Image (cartoon, rainbow, N blue to C red):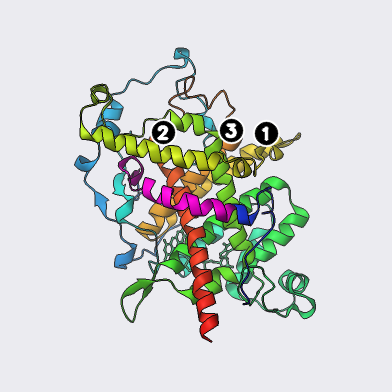
Amino acid sequence: EGYCSPSGPIEHTSCAYETIEQVNTELFPKIHELVEHPFFRYYKVDLFRECPFWQENGFCMNRACSVEETEESEIPEKWRAKALSAVTVSSAEDGPSSCYFRDDDFCFIEDDSTPDGQYIDLALNPERFTGYAGDSSHQVWRAIYKENCFGLSEAGFASSLAGRGGKGPKEVLASAVVGAGGVSTPNDNGWGFSKLSEGWGTEMVKSASAETCEEKKLYYRVISGLHASISIHICAEYLDTTTGEWKPNLQCFVNRLATHPERLSNVYFNAVLVLRAIARAAPYFRAYDVGVTPRAMLAKESCSTAAGDRATRSLLDDVLSIAERSDVASGFDEAAFFQGPDAPILKEQFKTHFRNVSRIMDCVGCDKCRLWGKLQVSGIGTALKILFALDDKALDPKRNPDLLQRSEVVALFNTLHRISESLSSVEDFRQIYAATQAAE
Ligand code: FAD
């Protein structure tokens, strides 16, 4: 009782919440297993680049913030810097398989082939509560939302962080959402949690829909969805400091997510966006070498690693088929964005802002948060590139086999995993909440 699920179409998509939830019950076990496979679990990232925007003093010294690196010798040789730098890069005259569209990257790409950076076994470094908080993390979030740069974000963030009272757009909006007087009403937010409170996100989405163009809303939704997804992981794997146990923290979820339904809605939105990108590039991924076996040995088909490679391939195929399900893949229409006379300028602006976000990640004062922040920005950047910068010709694996680097593929599928796990945790929290209600 008092429990209901969100329903109807997710704004900016023709997908319903129910569809995404249904798809996620199928997707989550597959993608959860896929990211355990070697191709997807080792990610090379430079965690020691300096923050280019401000002096970062807030380094998190908690153990939970630290990242366990992997020795390069444990990494399959075919991805290692030495092996890759030995590959001859083809020139522009060699045809479309040379690196074209590099200019279209939406983010700074971590690269297997550079000497900088460390290999990380993602499975050994789960994204969860680290204790990183306060001014340092707020400064990073503020800078990221400021990249929205459309005149709406800064005031909202500043006021929400300062807990400003008084009459402002927040109060006006709260009344609009929950009825006259801004009084919260039970069970009216559609997420099964009784208290609806106004928040900065609500404010932004409502003001954004009234005043800004689709691309600006897109930027905001993607960032807010990423932020919400990170918050869900924090709440789902929270450290109970009294017992030393890692477990879900319902109050954390209620405070950060459930009372801000639009934040949750942005996670669903990101699910549709990333699934659509993966569906669009599915033929490309089907041709991608996701194995660890050196090409020369693959021909012999004798070693046991080839069987492992086949298992990776088969799981990837399952994930691609789920993404290609027509009700999901057609749920997002990339052609609705970046149209009209301002399209090239808007696209350029969007790209610049998103690239800045990937640089802002160097300012995150907690290694583990920086790792997952970088990976997810890169994953979303790759999805945006597939949706908005590449046409079908470019995505043709025969014409353009080197279009995406391994790190981009790893980031994209791990980002889908992060989102999928978030949606799965939302369901867990609904059940925990229902159980506490029943016990009262
Ligand atoms: P914050 O999450 O810091 O949010 C600040 C303000 O932004 C809120 O007051 C609210 O007004 C607004 N806001 C919050 N969520 C949304 C949303 N979804 N949409 C729109 N507006 C919103 N901590 C960990 O424990 N583990 C991690 O792995 C981790 N990873 C991080 C990665 C990055 C890139 C960053 C910048 C921080 C990370 N943190 C992590 C810190 C974490 O995100 C929070 O900043 C911290 O837990 C403090 O939370 P808070 O309640 O003060 O609000």
Is disc 2 surrounded by few (<14), some (14 to 19) or many (20+) residues within 10 Å? some
**What are the residue bounds of the magenta stretch?**
20-44
Relative image position of residue 49 (x, y in whole percent): 37, 48
Relative to 410, residue 29 above or below: below
In space, the residues marked 1 and 3 are separated at their CA atoms by: 11 Å
| Residue ID for mark 3 | 389
Mark number displayed over residue 402: none
Any part of residue 300 in sight: yes
| Residue ID for mark 1 | 344
Q: Residue furthest top?
A: 93
**Which of the marked residues, 2 or 3, is nearer the chain's N terminus?**
3
Classify mark 3 as within 8 Å of ligand 1 or not, answering yes or no: no
Q: Quadrant of residue 153?
A: bottom right
Relative image position of residue 117 (x, y in whole percent): 31, 44
Looking at the rendered structure, the kind of residue marked 3 is: Ala
Please report the residue visible at 21 percent of the width from the left and 27 percent of the height from the top. Answer: 302
In terms of secondary structure, where does tag 2 sit?
loop
Q: Is residue 164 magenta?
A: no
**Which of the marked residues, 2 or 1, is nearer the chain's N terminus?**
1
| Mark 2–mark 3 CB contact (< 8 Å) | no
Image quadrant in which the N terminus is located: bottom right
Is disc 1 surrounded by few (<14), some (14 to 19) or many (20+) residues within 10 Å? few
Relative image position of residue 45 (x, y in whole percent): 35, 45
Foreground of the two, 382 or 20: 20
Please report the residue visible at 40 percent of the width from the left and 58 percent of the height from the top. Answer: 369
Please report the residue visible at 69 percent of the width from the left and 65 percent of the height from the top. Answer: 203
Please report the residue visible at 71 percent of the width from the left and 40 percent of the height from the top. Answer: 336
Looking at the rendered structure, the kind of residue marked 1 is: Pro
Relative to 288, residue 198 above or below: below
By secondary structure, the bulk of the magenta-drawn segment is best described as helix
| Mark 2–mark 1 CB contact (< 8 Å) | no
